[in-house]
Structures are given as structure tokens and as C-alpha cells.
Amino acid sequence: MAFFDKLSGLFSPDLVQACLVLALISAAVVIGLFAYVGQRTERASYRYWTIGWLFYAVFLAAMIAADFMVQNWQLAAVPTACAALSALFIFAGNMEVVERPVGRNRIFILALVIVALNYLAHREGFAYWFSCPAFWALAAVAVHAGRLFYLSRTTTVGAKLVMTGYTVWAAMVVAVPLIERVPVLFGLNGFISAACLMAVALGVILDHQLTNSEQKYRALMEGSSDALFMVDLWSLKVVDANQAASRLARRSADELVGVDFPGMCPELRKAGKTMLDHRRMFADVFKPFNEFHLVRSDGSLVLCEGDTTLAQWQERAVVQVRLRELDPAKNLGPLVRRAEKMSSLGQLIAGVAHELNNPLAVVVGYAQILAKQPNESEFMRTYVGHILHEAERAAKIVRDLLSFARPCEPKFAVVEINQLVAAVLKVRQRDLAGHAIELREDLATGLSQTKADAIQIEQVLNNLITNAVHAMTSQAGARVLTVRTEAQGMFLRISVVDTGCGIAPETMAKMFEPFFTTKAPGKGTGLGLSISQNILAEHHGRLWAESTVGKGSTFHLELPVVPCEAPAPVPVATEPVATNVSVNQNRRLLVVDDEPGIRDVLTAILASCGYQVTGAANGVEALAEIRRQEFDLIITDMCMPEMDGEKLYDTIQAKHPKFADRMIFVTGDTVSVKSRTFLERTGCRWLSKPFNINDVEEAVETFLHERLDKLTDGTPFAVNQMKELLRHT
């Protein structure tokens, strides 16, 4: 009694009212949550439960206003009626869960009966004998609802919370008729009920989130055409499988659950006792190009290949096994022959492209020399310009053929996507203006840095812009090219949007195939999109298109965001050195190339700048010249008979090491892995065939200027003294 008196002192009438208000707020939270889940899931059970909780909230509101309502027996009948109606609708929701719906008409009739009986009981003075069954029924349906939640998801935290909340709340509901006139106990009941209702709300939230996750997971599982098995990494039992797995194993999904997976895959041998041992066992069997058999329910064997991925399934470590059926009767001969033909074709293309680069370099070189000559004839300027334009077209075709025949691995470095896009667009502005195309840039700010091969990504962008220009060339209306950058989760997206003619569906299906083109003969090779897609695949990105015929096309390029350190500070570029013919007369240069045309054009370019130029047809002749006289710079081809550029460099490094850092290489095959590896190893400059004479002049002048800076090293010598020193070094 002392404890009860002390408790009564704590629960003042105001505190009892506060506890009831807290319970009412908790009920309102449950009502809102159940209404939201019911709308999202479209389950009738949640709609009935929402109505049931709404009647319970009215009951709490009536109890808060009990002092006012007790003066009128008709108003005093409201709380009991609400409790009984709450029990009715929660029961109707439970029946929907077990797929035994009560029906709206029956619910309406039962509700009328409950209201009528409650009215008669209060009028005749038997309210207590009606309220007890009403509250006991409410408690019973609450326990039933909690049990349904628990049975549906026995292992989840949400189901346990809902079950516990409903059970404790039911105990509080049973006690309501007995303690209704004891304020202290009624207030304590309201406080505990509020806590129970919040536990129910939290459990429903967790359950709803889990349901959404499972729906997405199930959609991914069933959306895969491959057979997917989720295998417990400890017990090696199948815990889940998709429909494709059921068809492959000829077992239903329920039959697959619990099956010992090594029993289905004889190649798996149980080895070890730890999960790490089991993981290694799976890795030994499910590896690229490995074939194995799966035992079906009828004992037949099916040949498969597959791979595995570690995952977590319902708080358990599992391995996801992905299997694909192989047809042993399938004739692989045509595929092998096709692969051999493509390999031979690649070698042929690489050889032809390399040989074409030499005459192209000669044509481009002499055309550029002619273009630089002072000539007032409009006729000469026009036709020299045509020669250069067509030669550059041919050079681009050669580069595409080499990229297709010898795809090289990307050289990853830190890049700023916006800077890369802006640089490409700046170069293409004149071309776009010449075709009356309006350029719109929409570059998002704050994009993360990533790692990519800037040269290859520029190649992809140029291919996409060239295709967009071609698509808009025949368009009579407005021609607009929009280039947009944006962040898409862990990817950076570049979109190239044109207002051209669009792409037909049958073309969309084949446009990424090698040598497929819709351009007229002589206008394209059909390699641009194929090479671009290969480049994006090497970057672990993707390239795809969206198009509507007559309304233009959009090509999307996505690159993954690769965490990278801040790039090293870019050295300040020195001003280009003006060509001084009188000074250059003291510089001796050696040009090594087995093609007389290239030797002659390089000699002509460099001699016009005042250099003393000596020619050599191969590495052997070059070594003989080096033994006879000093050279300030050696420009050599990579591919030559008797002694190529790589062997020449190694020989010079061994016998004449002071000349090893005075070399510039010329090559027509920069996509070759061997060539790029060698050039990176030496650290020497290189020029790509066909070269631009301005690039040749700038490379030579910059090299000699940097070498002069290294020799001075800040020492206050007179410039003429340093020139003389450089001449005799």
C-alpha cells in the first residue's frame, strides 16, 4: 500500500492527462504510418488497420475528455463503442493477411450491431458488461496481428518489435475496464501503451524498408537470364534461387531451398572446415573459361560455366553463384575460324596502315612546306589547302584502322572532365561554325576528378561530335549541338545532343559493330563508334545512345569516379623560342629514316630553319655518322631494317651515352603497346606520322632551348659563350 500511495502521489491528474495525450500522439503516428504503407503497397490489410487505429485514437480522445462526457450517458458510450469498432477493423485487416476477407457488407452490418448493442448496454446500465468483451476482443486481435507479423518475418528485428509491442499493448488494453476509475493506474497504462505503439511503428518502418529491399533484390534476381543460386558459405545449402535456376536444375524454387549445393555440382569437393576454405573451393571451380556439370533432379547432367560473388543475405554470409548453360553440341568451328580471320585481318590492317603512314607523311610535309611559302596565287593556296585536307582525312582513317587492329591499354592519369571537354570544344569551334551549328555548353560545376586516358576520351568526344555534325549537315532548320556534363552517382556523364535526323531503330541495333556505317562510300570507315565503345569498356564505363527519328540523337558517355590524389602542380610553360636562322647554323642534326621521302622532307623543314642536317638510312649508318662528328640532336624513325630505333637507342646508350638524351623518335604506330612502352621507358620526345611541320620545328627548338638551360644552370655566362659551348659539346 505504501508503494501504491507513493505512485499515486507521482501521478497527479495533470500527469495522467499528459500520459493519455502521449498515447494519443503515438496512435496518430501509427495511423499516419499505416495509411502511408497502405497507399504505397495497396494492401487492404493496412487500410483496415488504419481505420481500426483511428477508432482507438477516438477512444483515447474520449478518455481525455471523460469529465465532460460522463455527464451524458450517450457520450459516455462513445469510448466503449470505439474500442469495439477498433477490434472489428483490426480483425478485418488480419483476415486480409490470411486471405480470408470478411467483406465490406459484413463489416458494415457488424459495425451497426456493435453500436446498437453498446447503446442498449449503456442505456440499461450494463456498460461494464459490454466494455469488458470489447476490450478483450481488441487485445485478442492485437495479439493475432503481432503473431501474423512475426510468422511472416521471424528473423527480422522489425517483426520482433511489432510482436512485442502488440503483445504488451494487448495486456494494457485488457486492464482498461478494470482500472478505468483508478487514475494512477490508468495514467501508467497510457504511458506504457504509448511506448508499445511507438515500438509497433518502428517495427513497421523497419519491415517496410526490408520489404522494399527484398522486392528490389527479387526483381534483380528474376530479371537475370542466368541461373542464380544463393549458397550459405558455412552450411553450403541453397538459401534462395531465381526462376532461371529452377529451370536449369529442374526443381521448383521451394525444392531448391535447403539443397546441398556440392551435391548438385560434383566438381565441388568439400574441403576444409572454415568459410575461407569453402570460398577457395568455389573459386577453384567457378573461374573464367572453366566448364563443369550440374546434376538435375532427374539425375541428368548439364554442362555449365559460371562465376561467383560474395554477398550478404539476411545477415548471413553467402556466395552468389551465377551459372550459364553450355550446349556441348554447338559447333564452335565457325567462331574459331572467325576469330582467326579477325586476327589475320588485324595484322594486315596494322601492316598496311603503317606502310601508308610513310607516303602520307611525305605528302603532308611537302604540302605544308608549300603552304608556308609566300605565294600570291589564290589558285595555289586553294589547291594546297585541298591536298592538306584530304591528306589529313587519310591520316585519320589510318589512325582509326590502327586503333581497331591494335587496341592499346589506356594510360590512366588524373583528369578534370570539364577541362577536357572544354579543350575539345575549343578546337572544334571553327568546324562547327563552318557548318552553321550553334554550340551550347552545359558543364556542371563541382565535378569530382577521376582517372582516365585523356587522349582516348578526347578521341571518343571527337568521334561523337563528328557524327553529330554529319547528322545535322543536311538539316534545313536550326542546328544545335549541346554538350553536357553531370554527376550520376559514382559516374561522370558526358552527353552529346544534336538536333539532326535521328537514328532508325534498325541502325541503333548495329551502329556499334565494326565497319558498319550509314555514310556514303568514302565518307567514313564505320570504326569510330566501335573504337569508342572499346575505349569506354577499357575505362570500365559505357557508351550508349538515345534517339528519335526526326528529333535528333543523344550519346551518353559515362566514366566511373576513381579516387585519386591531387595532381602534381603543372610546370609553368616557357615561351616558345623564336627561330633564329643565324644561331641555328651552328646546330648539327642527324635524321635517320629508311624512307628517302621522309628523310628529304625532314631535311627540307629543318634546313629552312638554318640547321646543319645530315641523313642516314638506318641505325648502322647513324652510328657511323655519330663516330665521325658531334650532333646536337638525333631524329630517328622507330621501324627500320638492319637496326631499328629501339636497338639504335640501346646501342647509343651503351657506347655513346652522352647522345642518349639527345634523341627524338618518329613513329607511325603509337597505338602499339611495344612502341608506347619503349617511349615511356626512354622518356624521349616523339612525333607521330604524318607530322605537322610546325610540331617538328617547335619540338626541335624547344629541345635545344631546354638543353641550353640545363647547361647554363643559372651561371652568368654570356649567351654567345654558351652557344659556342653547346656547339662543341
Image (cartoon, rainbow, N blue to C red):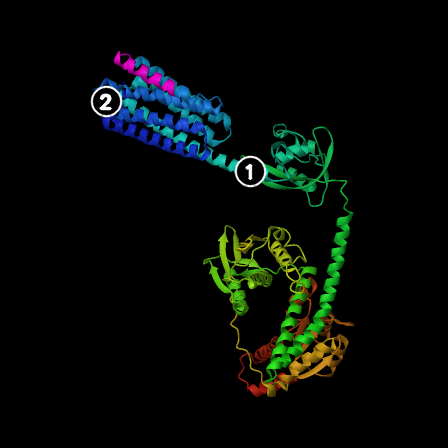
User: Within the image, what quadrant is residue 644 found in?
Assistant: bottom right
State which quarter of the image contains the C terminus.
Answer: bottom right
Identity, as a three-letter code, of the amino acid under mark 2: Met
Inspect the magenta stretch and tell me whether residue 715 lies in it: no
- Judging depth in this view, the residue of 661 and 529 nearest the camera is 529
Q: Residue at x 34, y 21 (%)?
A: 83
Residue 362 place in picture, x, y as percent: 69, 76
User: Which residue in the structure is indicated by mark 2?
Assistant: 69
Q: Residue at x 68, y 58 (%)?
A: 515
Query: Mainly helix, strand or loop, the magenta region?
Result: helix
Residue 376 place in picture, x, y as percent: 59, 85
Q: Does the image show residue 628?
A: yes
Callout 2: SS: helix
Start-end of magenta stretch:
108-127
Inspect the magenta stretch and tell me whether residue 115 lies in it: yes
Callout 1: SS: helix
Q: Of marks 2 and 1, which one's residue comes earlier in the chain?
A: 2
Identity, as a three-letter code, of the amino acid under mark 1: Ala
Q: Does the image show residue 192?
A: no
How far is disc 2 from disc 1 in space, using C-alphas?
54 Å
User: Which residue in the structure is indicated by mark 1?
Assistant: 219
